[in-house]
Amino acid sequence: MNASTAPEPRPEPRPEDRPARLTVGVVGAGRVGPALAASLRLAGHRPVAVSAVSDRSRRRAAELLPDVPVVEPARVLALADLVLLTVPDDALPGLVEGLADTGAVRPGQLLVHTSGRYGVRVLDPVRRAGALPLALHPAMTFTGTPVDVQRLAGCSFGVTAPEELRLAAEALVIEMGGEPEWIAEDARPLYHAALALGANHLVTLVAQSMELLRKAGVAAPDRMLGPLLGAALDNALRSGDAALTGPVARGDAGTVAAHVAELRKHAPGTVAGYLAMARTTADRALAHGLLKPELAEDLLGVLADSTTAADGPQGAAGPQGDDR
C-alpha cells in the first residue's frame, strides 16, 4: 500500500477532550459491565459502586472489581460520575425510565449504555434530567472473566452520542484500549444485526459441527476444526465471497444430497440450518461467478426437494417431525 492510499492515522484526543478522572459505577454486573469498569480502572478512573442481584453476578463483580461495594442502582448513581448501564437490551428502556423516575440522576452525570441495538434516544428520560448520554457498544464476546479486559485491546466499539459529546465518547473508548467506530442512531439495529449474524450464529454453527464430528468418531473435534476454521475466517475477512469453497460453491449436488440424508438420520435438528445456509451460500456463489449456472440448477433442485421434505408431514416442521 503506497502513501497515497494508506489511511490516515486516527488523531489522539486533545488533552481538553479527554475525560477527567472519574468515579465509575456499574448497574448490572453481567459479563460486560465489570470488564469495562476494570478497564477504566487501568486508565486511571476509579470504580466506586456496582449493583448485582444474582450470586453469579456478585462473584463476577468480586473477581473483576475487588473491594468495590455492591449497592442498589440508585446508590450507584449517587456515588458515580460515570455510570455504565450494562443490562440486557430488552431491560434497558425500563431501567432508564425507572432511574429517571426515582430522581437519582444528577445533571452533568455521564450515563453510558452498552447495548448494540440502541443509540442514545433510549436515554432520553435521563437526558431530560440533565444526564449526558452515550452509547458505547464493544464488538466483542465476553466470558465474565479477567481475560475480557485483555480482549478489549484493539476491540472496535460502536459509538453513538450527541455531537457535543462525540470527542468525549471516543476518548473513553480509546482509554479502554478500544477503537471507536461512529454508528448513526438509526443504523444501530442494522449494525447490531450484522454482529449477531457473524458472531452469535458462528458459535451455534461451530458447536453443531463439533457435535457431528463426535458422532462421526472424531475424538478431538476442536483440534480438527481449529486450523480449518481459523483459515476460513482469515480468508473470509480478506476476500469475502471469493473465499467460498466446498460442495455448494462447486455445485456438487450429489454431495449436498448425501449430507442432507445423513443429517436427517443422525442429527435432524441441524437440517433446517444446513439448508438455509446452503441456499444462501449458493445464491452468493452464483452471484459472484463461483458457481456455474449449469451446476446451480441441479444443486438448487436438491435444496428445494430437501426443503419440501422437511416441510412435509414426516419432516422437521410436520406434526411427526423429528425436531418436535
Image (cartoon, rainbow, N blue to C red):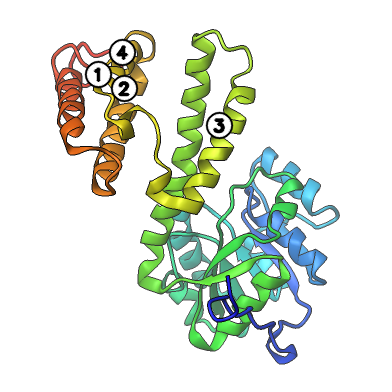
Q: Is residue 273 left or right of residue 165?
A: left
Task: Give the Cα distance between marks 1 and 2.
Answer: 8 Å
Q: Mark on residue 264? A: 4
> Depth check: 168 or 228 in front?
228
Tag 1: amino acid: Ala
Q: Are the residues at dot 3 and dot 4 in contact (C-beta closer than 8 Å)?
A: no
Circle 1 residue: 316
- Find numbered disc 3 in the image and state the secondary structure of the residue it sits on: helix
- Find numbered disc 2 in the image and state the secondary structure of the residue it sits on: helix
Q: Earlier in the sequence, mark 3 or mark 4?
A: 3
Task: Give the Cα distance between marks 4 and 2.
Answer: 6 Å
- Find numbered disc 4 in the image and state the secondary structure of the residue it sits on: helix
What residue is drawn where x is 52% and y is 43%? 233
Quarter of the image where one finds residue 41: bottom right
Tag 4: amino acid: Arg
Circle 3 residue: 228
Task: Give the Cα distance between marks 4 and 1.
Answer: 9 Å
Task: Give percent across and percent down for residue 181.
Answer: 53, 70
Quadrant of the frame with the C terminus: top left
Tag 3: amino acid: Leu
Tag 2: amino acid: Val
> Depth check: 293 or 59 in front?
293
Circle 2 residue: 271
> Depth check: 147 or 165 in front?
147
Q: Are the residues at dot 1 and dot 2 in contact (C-beta closer than 8 Å)?
A: yes
Q: Residue furthest front?
A: 2
- In the image, which is nearer the foreground, mark 3 or mark 1? 3
What residue is drawn where x is 15% and y is 21%? 305
Q: Earlier in the sequence, mark 4 or mark 2?
A: 4
